Amino acid sequence: MALMITDECINCDVCEPECPNDAIYMGEEIYEIDPHKCTECVGHFDEPQCVQICPVACIPVNPAHQESRETLWQKFERLNAQKAAREQAAREQAAQAEGAAAPTPPSAS
Ligand code: SF4
Ligand code: SF4
């Protein structure tokens, strides 16, 4: 199940940096959770980190996103694969930029 943040949120900012999936973001008025990124911390921690740290206990299960542990695990694996692909692309881009900036060696003749 993905979690959600209710309007009891006091925008204290402490949960956002704790999320291992970058699923928490500032919405129009309060923080929100992207259900496509929230794995309930499955794959990273035993307990949802945002729930552990929230001072006003305003992070329940999102009833619109009921998922089994297996589905959450698959989501974790998909997110991980996407992150690895992004990091690989960034590395390749950096290597290309470095190659373009490197001076041309003088010719032997
Ligand atoms: Fe992020 Fe875990 Fe909270 Fe979901 S339960 S929003 S993955 S910290
Ligand atoms: Fe809102 Fe709780 Fe997150 Fe603080 S920890 S920003 S109160 S959801």
Image: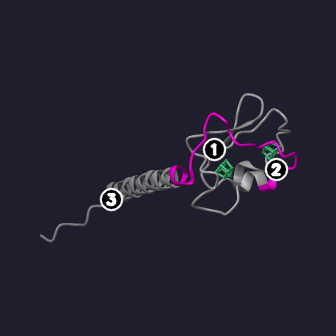
Q: Is mark 2 within 8 Å of ligand 2?
A: yes
Residue range in magenta is 52-72
User: Pointers 1 and 2 in contact (CB under 8 A)?
Assistant: no
> Does 37 sit left or right of 33 as displayed?
left
Magenta highlight on residue 1: no
**On residue 83, which mark appears?**
none
Q: In x, y percent, where is residue 88?
A: 40, 57
Q: Quadrant of residue 97?
A: bottom left
Q: Is mark 1 within 8 Å of ligand 1?
A: yes
Q: Residue at x 12, y 70 (%)?
A: 109
Mostly what secondary structure, the magenta segment?
loop
> Does 80 sit left or right of 10 as displayed?
left
Q: Residue at x 63, y 55 (%)?
A: 41
Say which amino acid is labelled 1.
Answer: Ala
Q: Residue at x 67, y 36 (%)?
A: 63
Image quadrant in which the N terminus is located: top right
Q: Is mark 3 within 8 Å of ligand 1?
A: no
Of 37 and 65, nearer the camera is 65
Say which amino acid is labelled 2.
Answer: Cys
Q: Which residue is mark 1?
A: 2
Query: Along the polypeptide, which appears first: circle 2 or circle 3?
Result: 2
Q: Which residue is mark 3?
A: 99
Query: Along the polypeptide, which appears first: circle 1 or circle 3?
Result: 1
Magenta highlight on residue 54: yes
Q: Which residue is mark 2?
A: 54
Q: Residue at x 85, y 36 (%)?
A: 8
Q: Is residue 33 above or below residue 88?
A: above
